[in-house]
Image: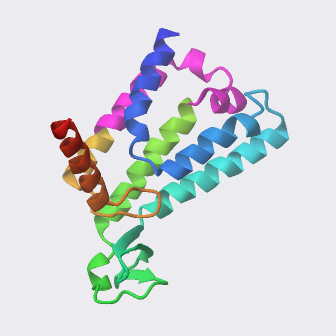
Amino acid sequence: MANTNKSLTGLESLIKLLPTGTLFIYLLLNPVLTNDSECSTGNKVMSSILVALCSFSCVFSCFTDSFKGVDGSTKFGIVTKKGLWTYAEPGSVDLSKYKLRIADFVHAGFVLAVFGTLVLLDANTASCFYPRFRETQKTLVMALPPAVGVASAAIFALFPSKRSGIGYAPIAEEVGAEEETKKASVSA
């Protein structure tokens, strides 16, 4: 049990790198689709589809960004080689500054690795697809979350994301929320 707690602690830091909606949907639906790790063939198929869709969502989110529209609301779009492709009227915003970068692909790869680690070490998924994995691969179960976490942290430090895409809080709003929290604690 102590080994499980250590691997879960390692996963906690990795989870912060994933789109929150995708992670929430996975964590909500996974126990239902795996039948609480009592899988039939149908459960395995449905769970595989869930993993594939959530993986796609994680990667897709890395190629989205947002900007403030003329009305002050947040508008989203898909990053392309030419700039941000969006349904919204950009107004005076230069969408060409949101071009696709190599860092976007690096982030997508590492976000996929983080999500894959979460899936691989999830108790329901592990019991469903590879029941003896946790017993036979204790070293991997203990080493994988910190290894993926260190590698991801290093990459995200070298190539920090400037994107505020779908599923992530906008960077400017995060800073504003932190400042509001500091002001509230100082005045209290």
x then y, percent, for residue 50: 67, 49
Q: Is residue 146 magenta?
A: yes
Q: Which residues are magenta?
A: 122-150
Residue closest to the eye, 54 or 168: 168
Vertical relation: 161 (above or below) 141: below
x then y, percent, for residue 53: 63, 55
Q: Is residue 80 visible?
A: yes
For the C terminus, give its image quadrant: top left
Return the residue found at the far top. Answer: 2
Rendered image quadrant of residue 159: bottom left
* Residue at image point 77% right, 46% down: 45
x then y, percent, for residue 88: 45, 84
Vertical relation: 114 (above or below) 9: below
x then y, percent, for residue 70: 34, 83
Return the residue found at the far front. Answer: 188
35 to the left or right of 176: right
Type of secondary structure dominating the magenta stretch: helix
Vertical relation: 4 (above or below) 157: above
Q: Is residue 142 magenta?
A: yes
* Residue at image point 56% right, 38% down: 119
Q: Is residue 140 visible?
A: no
Residue closest to the eye, 65 or 99: 65
* Residue at image point 45% right, 23% down: 7
Rendered image quadrant of residue 23: top right
